[in-house]
Image (cartoon, rainbow, N blue to C red):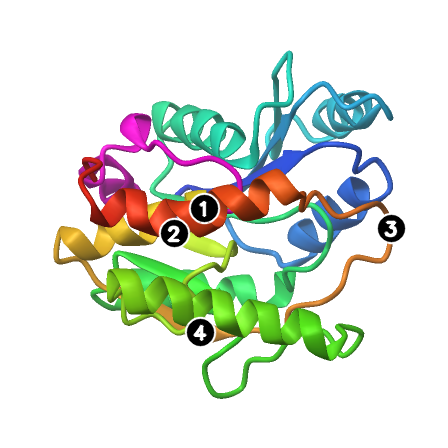
Amino acid sequence: MVEVSPKVVVVVPTYNERENLPVLTGLLTDLGLPNLHVLVVDDNSPDGTGEIADKLAEQSPDRVGVLHRTEKDGLGRAYIAGMTRALDEGADVVVQMDADLSHPAPVLPVMIDTLLTGDAAVVLGSRYVPGGSTAAEWPWHRKALSAWANLYVNTILRLHVKDATAGFKAWRAETLRAIDLPSVHSNGYSFQVEMNYRTVKRGLRIVEVPIRFEERVVGASKMSLGVQVESALAPWKLLLGRKA
């Protein structure tokens, strides 16, 4: 009897990533991981990213899928839509990955192996465990802000996670169901914090593996003042009574 490899779906939200998306899908394909699928969640990108995604899906219908959304309403909403689709289509492992090439694709096999061979509920690619690092191009104040954000979140929520704001994660399908994915409140980058908080609150284990976080080469960052404010308020909302 032939053993079937777990179905792994990499959910990639996109907004104006037409140059980066083909590169990322190529990097993922080159990994040679069995039963690996890519689900692009495009928020009606004006630069034609959605059309690029459709072409990639036409070329590799068994490997690439596309979920078109009609409006850009935040990273968290895009991830929830994509992860819900992945679960509905039978994913055993759901991966969160940015389209801007900041997350190193070669680390993905290590993350998946760590997830499937141990007791981790989720494995995240971490900048702040031994062996991890941030982009050399980052100025000192950006590195300081990132480090402070993680200290801030962990001080309030006691997650005991070195990189609490990380966005490169491999989830067991049963973990996403256990944390009640459809009811996640947060959007933007605070989505990452709420997902971790829900996992920890249920007594589930988060494991970190080291990555080098790279600076995007093409396109513009999606970080805005509104996103930063939401991210600062989110830990307090979680701590002071919002259901998690």
State the CA–CA distance, disc 4 to disc 1: 21 Å
Badge 2 vs badge 3, beta-carbon distance below 8 Å: no
Q: Secondary structure at mark 3?
A: loop
Membership of 108 in magenta stretch? no
For disc 4, the marked residue is 209
Disc 1 is placed on an element classified as helix
Label 4–label 3 contact, CB within 8 A: no
Of mark 2 and mark 4, the one earlier in the sequence is 2
* Cα–Cα gap, marks 1 and 2: 5 Å
Looking at the rendered structure, the kind of residue marked 1 is Ser
Q: Earlier in the sequence, mark 4 or mark 1?
A: 1
Contact, CB < 8 Å: mark 1 with mark 2? yes
At 64% across and 64% down in the image, what residue appears? 104
**Secondary structure at numbered mark 2:** helix
Q: Residue at x 61, y 79 (%)?
A: 133
Which mark is drawn over residue 193? Answer: 2
Label 2 and label 4: CA atoms lie apart by 17 Å
Question: Tag on residue 218?
Answer: 3
As drawn, 32 above or below 160: above
Which mark is first along the chain, 1 or 3? 1
Q: Which one is nearer the viewer's eye here, 160 or 180? A: 160
Q: Which residues are magenta?
A: 173-189
Residue corresponding to mark 1: 190
